[in-house]
Image (cartoon, grey):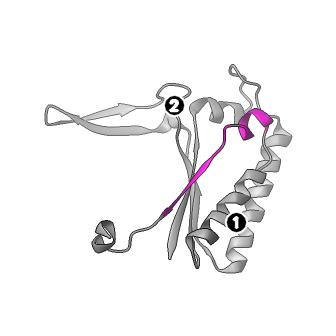
Amino acid sequence: MKYMILTYASQQDYDGMAGKATDKPAWTAEDFAAMGAFMEKLNGDLVESGELVETRALAAPVLTRRLGSKDGASVVTDGPYAETQEVLAGYWIVECESFDRATEIASRLADTPAPEFVRATAYADIRPIVESGAELVE
């Protein structure tokens, strides 16, 4: 079964990782390097176990474009949105034996090196990937 593990951040989080101070302290270069090394190790472990299908980090919300509709017409809104509004920051697609195993993989993210104020509010979602329309109604 395939599962998607999703992580979230805000523009403020991206600014902090880029070393820009907001109402929270900026990350140090060492903080950012430690996070990168952790992610490389996690991804390498998942490649080695054969469970990683794909993983990607996503660009900052300031580079986001949201498409909606109003009165039957398409409406495009460029980011950033509210500085603290969370958006999808990255994802992993894993193929593993069970929801419990996908949860175990995602739980490793709790060990990601980051400033404590970031770790205190970090979370991930784990969702099964639907392979057919029939699975949506089960």
| Camera-nearest residue between 65 and 72 | 72
Amino acid carrying label 1: it is: Asn
Q: Amino acid at mark 2?
A: Gln
For discs 1 and 2, the disc positioned in front in the rendered view: 2
Please say if 97 is above or below 114. below
For label 1, the SS is: helix
Q: Position of residue 134 (x, y in %)?
A: 28, 73
Report x, y in % for residue 17.
71, 36
Q: Quadrant of the C terminus?
A: bottom left
Query: Reading the chain from its start, which is encountered first: label 1 or label 2?
Result: 1
Residue farthest front in this picture: 138
Which portion, as a residue range, is magenta?
Answer: 115-127
Secondary structure under badge 2? Answer: loop
Camera-side residue: 94 or 18? 94
The residue lying toward the viewer, choosing from 35 and 7, is 7
Q: Quadrant of residue 84?
A: top right
Q: Are marks 1 and 2 in contact (CB under 8 Å)?
A: no
Question: Where's residue 112, x and y in %?
Answer: 76, 51
Q: Residue at x 71, y 55 (%)?
A: 109
User: Disc 1 designates what residue?
Assistant: 43
Tally the numbered discs. 2
Q: Mark 1 to mark 2: distance in Å?
A: 27 Å
Q: For the point 48% across and 29% down, which residue is it?
A: 80
Residue linked to disc 2: 85
Question: Residue 117: within the magenta?
Answer: yes
The residue shown at (63%, 71%) is 101
x 68%, y 65%: residue? 104
Residue 69 falls in image quadrant: top left
Q: Is residue 7 above or below residue 61?
A: below
Badge 2 crowding class, 10 Å Cα cut-off, few under 14, some 14 to 19, many 20 or more, is: few
